[in-house]
Amino acid sequence: MTSLPENTAVPNTSQEEIEHTIAACHGCDLLLVVPSIPDGHYLACRRCGTIISKTYQDSINRVLILGFTGLLLYLPAILLPLMTLSSIGFNESGSVLDSCINFYRNGYYFVAVMVFFTAVVFPFLKLFLPFVISLYVKLNRQPGWLKSAFRFLGHLEEWGMVEVYLLGILITLIKMSDMASIDYNAGFFCFIALVMITMATSVNLDRNLFWALIDSSQDDKTRNRLNRIKDELQQKPEHILTAAQSGLIRCHDCGKLISTEHNDPATKPKCPRCHASVHQRSKNSIPRTWALVITSFILFIPANTLPIMRVDFLGVPESSTILDGIQYFFNDGSYGIGLIILAASILVPLFKIIGLIIILLTIKSGKNHFLKQKAKMFRFIEFIGRWSMLDIFVIALLTVMVDFGFLTSTHAAPGATYFCIVVAATMTAAIVFDPRIIWDRCETPAKDAISLRETYASTDGS
Ligand SMILES: [Zn+2]
Ligand SMILES: [Zn+2]
């Protein structure tokens, strides 16, 4: 996959296609002329590097087939035993669903709910919704719930974590390979196939195309405004012009550009396409991010100092923290696995917390340095967030698989709950933070921005 040259000229500039030829970057609010992109290419924002749009060949048919195949695999992958561990006459096997139920039975309700939703419910919706939506789009039918369903799917991306769970299975296998003989069951192979199909479905889903096919209408005034902006950007490709400066708001859920001049000030503006509430910047983004980052920072201490797992060997309990688990792999000579768990359980949460604190503090101080680097760091924080769940999934599997009666059994310990809250809070912090705020300080002074908005508003009626 390759990127196109920045601000490439638009080959098709008919009035009907205007909506697809102007887009606002969701990372920095910059307005860009989006050309027709050949299949297999993507367009990145020239200011912050955020991917604006990607295209895939035959997206609707591929998503339809992949979603259907994934749904066929889903029940066996979740319900059938993944593997059977045998040791001194004891056999124990378990499925993905069993691993959630075990947390619930042992009173770890928050962890049970988190594992249930990230490994069972959301992975199902990440297949079911693309399948149903692509089917309706292909049939050219639009039931009332279609837009809401597609909006909801957009929020699921980072919360369905089958690939993280698969890495958890592989680590469990390596951990148990010395202690027990392992037989792979049908669920194991179905789960691997499910992970591959789920990833392929997400990759092939061309969101911009789907939204355009669901609804690409535009009112005349906004169309005129976009036309005017497009002409200006084509004449001056280096011009830095944001949606906010032009009196436009980008809908966070579907990407539609909405004119702010025609909204009734008494009512909250809504996106005419997906009906989501729209804001120039996410409401109270900075205080909400601070609250979640501080919560994560405080809970990170018990998450790492309290035991996360307890192993009863011949009736003698032995508790271990996250660091003990990492030390176990290093002592065992499994440096690769030790490093993966060290990165996922300690370095990733710490990086997320410290990275967000740096971004928040530099916004507060009004410093405009390293904006591109901060935007890149934020995208990395968004990307890595979900991998912290790795250790929780390993514990989920060990508590099911390693239950050999009096000989040895594995149980979750209180640190698991604190750790799970840290993961959920840091992921939510990255979601509520609006990255466009990073760039706001370096933009046109407010007075100039108002005159710019008025310039575009005055052309709407022409
Ligand atoms: Zn950008
Ligand atoms: Zn929308």
Image: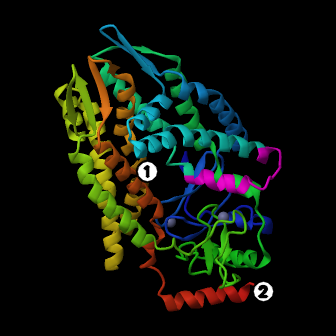
Of tags 2 and 1, the one toward the viewer is 1
Give the quarter of the image for residue 409. top left
Q: Secondary structure at mark 2?
A: loop
Circle 1 residues within 10 Å: few <14, some 14–19, many ≥20: few
On screen, residue 302 versus residue 97, left or right, reads left
Within the image, what quadrant is residue 369 found in? bottom left
Mark number displayed over residue 286: none
Q: Between 218 and 190, which is closer to the camera in this rendering?
A: 190
Which three-letter amino acid code belongs to the residue tagged 2? Gly
- Compared to 416, does 23 lie above or below? below
The quadrant of the rendering that contains the N terminus is: top right
Kind of residue indicated by mark 1: Phe
The secondary structure that most of the magenta stretch takes on is: helix
Regarding residue 369, the answer to whether it shows in the image is: no
Q: How many angstroms separate mark 2 from mark 1 (CA)?
A: 43 Å
Name the residue beneath numbered marker 1: 383
Q: Position of residue 230 (x, y in %)?
A: 67, 73
Residue at (49, 40) in percent of width and height: 116
User: Regarding mark 1 in the picture, which secondary structure is present there?
Assistant: helix
* Residue extending farthest top: 89
At x 69%, y 33%, the residue is 68
* Furthest-left residue in this view: 331
Measured from the top left, where is residue 7 in percent x and y? 58, 65
Tell which circle, 2 or 1, labels the residue nearer the N-terminal end: 1
Q: Which residue is mark 2?
A: 461
Magenta stretch: includes residue 152: yes
Q: Over which residues does the magenta segment extend?
A: 136-155
Front one among 246 and 350: 350
Where residue 92 appears, as percent x and y from the top left, is: 40, 17
Report whether the residue tagged 2 is closer than 8 Å to ligand 2: no
Residues packed near mark 2 inside 10 Å, few (<14), some (14 to 19) or many (20 plus): few
